[in-house]
Image: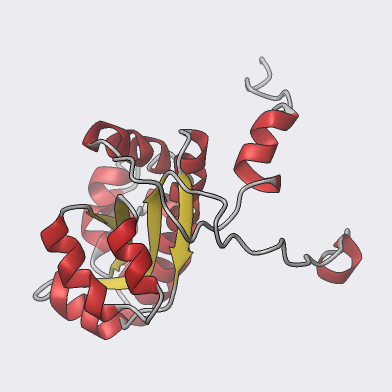
Amino acid sequence: MADFPFTEPLNDTVLDQLFREARTINVWRDKPVSDALIKQVYDLTKMGATSANCCPARFHFVKSDAAKARLKPLVMEGNDIKVMQAPVTVIIANDLKFADKIPQLFPHNPGAKDWFADPVAAEITAMRNGTLQGAYLMLAARALGLHCGPMSGFDNAAVDAEFFAGTELKSNFICALGYGTDEEVFERSPRLDFDEAAAIL
């Protein structure tokens, strides 16, 4: 039996790009993000782990001027500027009917679809795993040289009505993607030390 591969730590440059020096961007350069790069971001994102490989997140990449104009009035003041300036803003949504794809995604146990028959359990599972996938998307974008501007300041119900009417999709959060500047980047806020937030049992 061989060890599973990829057990060496990543170098400091990579860790800085993904975590230590990564920042929430508020002002964006006028540099487009190609559809090909957006697809690369998704192709990395989809590899992240979810419960029973349920993959409940759905990603709507708001890129065209027309789509941005639809999103702009649904976000809080200040965020509307970011939506219009960023090359892309992705709406990360949860598909409450994600279990319909379990036979496709979890083929060794297609009956696992029934684990999520209870709507409450399905909603909790979708939120937990959809949020995970949103975080994977941010790491994937950073790994591919993009910056991120995650936002929760928007009207979820209005976004759902505008973009997801007639579906079982519910918006979770939005995240601007592109190439940022250091303008209006806040000083790094404190983080909790290990002993304040964690324990080894």
**Left or right of residue 156, residue 35 in this image:** left
Q: Is residue 137 above or below residue 152?
A: above
Residue 171 visible somewhere in the drawing:
yes
Viewer-closest of 129 and 172: 172
Coloring applied to the structure: secondary structure
Q: Residue at x 46, y 33 (%)?
A: 144
Kindly identify the residue that appears in the image at 70 percent across and 25 percent down. 7
**Front-most of residues 133 and 98:** 133
- In the foreground, 107 or 145: 145
- x then y, percent, for residue 127: 42, 70
Q: Is residue 38 left or right of residue 100?
A: right
Quarter of the rendering occupied by the N terminus: top right
Q: Residue at x 43, y 43 (%)?
A: 179
Q: Residue furthest top?
A: 2
Quadrant that contains the C terminus: bottom right
Give residue 100's quadrant in the image. Answer: bottom left
Vertical arrangement, residue 73 with respect to residue 39, above or below: below
Between residue 77 and residue 44, name the one nearer to us: 77
